[in-house]
Image: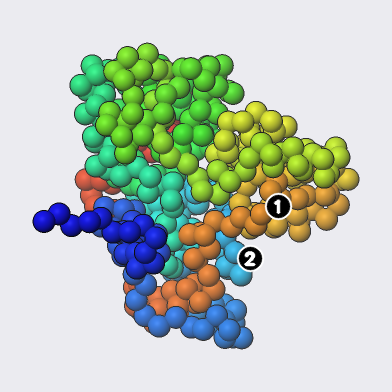
């Protein structure tokens, strides 16, 4: 007897493992994200949270060094000793060898990079282990290994150089180092690709398709036809052997959930709404958005451009809302608006809130190590090799 398939209109739907993971109710051990946060968090309504954070940080003194990514909430960023993008913060951590604890107010892959670059006796702590990165999770070690097998079977692996964005897990950085590649940031992606094409004939760019495509086409003069999109969820990445062999850029099908929201309609709408506006976007945005923008650059570039902009100028910024709001407050003499009318925070970055930071600092002040991020020695060795290749770029 054959059992009839369940009716699609039934409301008694069982969530898939992926849905449970996205809801924070399950954990994937192969993912760069975690979901556990042991201990009792203070209430968000506690009026003494700011004072508690300040007191715990003062008690720790030079033993703790707090890093705050640009996309963090204001309530958290006020306690950062240094603010910056992911790579700047990892380097700042490495430059503080006397700090026993590095509290990274960012996301998981950033804390991993800090652990890779700091000394063995330093302890990197992430206030909430559920602060992951959806882009980094779009490329797992197993998927990338399978992709390399596909490239090998196509007879091109020997001439392909992997280049991985800083926004990737330690496993992906280690893969990159092991296979002769390098890491890049949004500010040095062209230099990394120039280097890669000196080493080989093709590039496998992980995991952000948009940064790879924008850099290749906008900054290096390639055509869109020089780029193919590898989908890890399809056999052979959804590509023919001929497509793989003829491509200069093999782009991984990954993206930033924040920057991917901006559209060509967003650009057109803001130009109508704010006459004379300058559109400034991050290169993680879609190619059509980048092509329609006036300025394109990394987070640091965005900040520096607005710092140097003349008073009275008008700007629409296509990046995470916490940063846009912060730079707007810092420049009241300029009109700075969010590129899209829809509010767009980085949801995982925002998991680092004041209660988690207070809990972390108070735990450390009491001598209890919590939420330590540790990269195993083999992974660290190859990942560090890839990072060092980036540091050596001209």
- Outermost residue to the front: 1
Q: Nearer the viewer, mark 2 or mark 1?
A: 1
Position above or below: 130 against 280:
below
Closer-to-camera residue (9/342): 9
Closer-to-camera residue (236/308): 236
Quarter-of-image position of residue 143: top left
Tell me if 60 is positioned left or right of 345 in this view: left
Position above or below: 318 against 211:
below
In the structure shown, which secondary structural element does the residue marked by tag 1 occupy?
Answer: loop
- Percent across and percent down for residue 273 are 82, 45
Closer-to-camera residue (373/227): 227
Number of dots carrying numbers? 2
Pointer 2 with pointer 1, Cβ within 8 A: no
Work out how far the residue at label 2 is from the one at label 1, CA to CA, in angstroms.
Answer: 21 Å
- Percent across and percent down for residue 353 are 53, 70
Is residue 123 at least partly visible in the picture?
Answer: no
Q: Mark 1 points at which residue?
A: 341
User: What number is the disc on residue 74?
Assistant: 2
Quarter-of-image position of residue 175: top left
């Amino acid at each position: 007897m054959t059992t009839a398939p369940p009716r699609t209109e039934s409301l008694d739907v069982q969530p898939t493992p992926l849905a449970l993971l996205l809801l924070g109710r399950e954990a994937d051990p192969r993912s760069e994200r975690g979901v556990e946060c042991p201990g009792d968090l203070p209430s968000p309504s506690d009026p003494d949270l700011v004072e508690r954070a300040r007191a715990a940080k003062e008690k720790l003194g030079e033993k703790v060094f707090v890093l705050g990514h640009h996309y963090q909430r204001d309530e958290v960023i006020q306690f950062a000793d240094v603010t910056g993008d992911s790579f700047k913060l990892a380097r700042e951590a490495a430059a503080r060898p006397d700090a026993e604890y590095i509290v990274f107010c960012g996301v998981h892959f950033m804390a991993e990079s800090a652990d890779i670059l700091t000394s063995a006796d330093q302890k990197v702590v992430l206030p909430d282990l559920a602060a992951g990165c959806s882009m980094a999770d779009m490329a797992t070690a197993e998927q990338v290994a399978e992709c390399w097998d596909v490239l090998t079977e196509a007879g091109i692996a020997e001439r392909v150089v992997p280049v991985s964005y800083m926004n990737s897990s330690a496993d992906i950085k280690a893969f990159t180092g092991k296979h002769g590649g390098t890491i890049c940031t949004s500010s040095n992606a062209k230099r990394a690709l120039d280097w890669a094409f000196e080493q080989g004939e093709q590039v496998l760019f992980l995991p952000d398709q948009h940064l790879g495509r924008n850099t290749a086409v906008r900054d290096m003069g390639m055509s869109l036809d020089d780029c193919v999109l590898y989908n890890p969820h399809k056999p052979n990445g959804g590509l023919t052997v001929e497509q793989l062999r003829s491509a200069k850029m093999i782009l991984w099908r990954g993206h930033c959930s924040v920057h991917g929201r901006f559209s060509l309609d967003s650009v057109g709408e803001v130009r109508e709404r704010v006459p004379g506006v300058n559109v400034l976007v991050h290169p993680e945005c879609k190619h059509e958005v980048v092509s329609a923008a006036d300025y394109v650059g990394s987070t640091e570039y965005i900040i520096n451009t607005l710092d140097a902009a003349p008073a009275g100028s008008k700007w629409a910024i296509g990046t995470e809302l916490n940063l846009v709001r912060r730079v707007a407050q810092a420049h009241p003499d300029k009109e700075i608006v969010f590129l899209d009318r829809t509010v767009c925070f980085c949801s995982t970055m925002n998991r680092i809130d004041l209660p988690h930071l207070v809990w972390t600092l108070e735990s450390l002040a009491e001598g209890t190590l919590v939420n330590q991020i540790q990269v195993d020695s083999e992974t660290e060795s190859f990942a560090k090799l890839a990072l060092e290749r980036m540091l050596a770029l001209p």
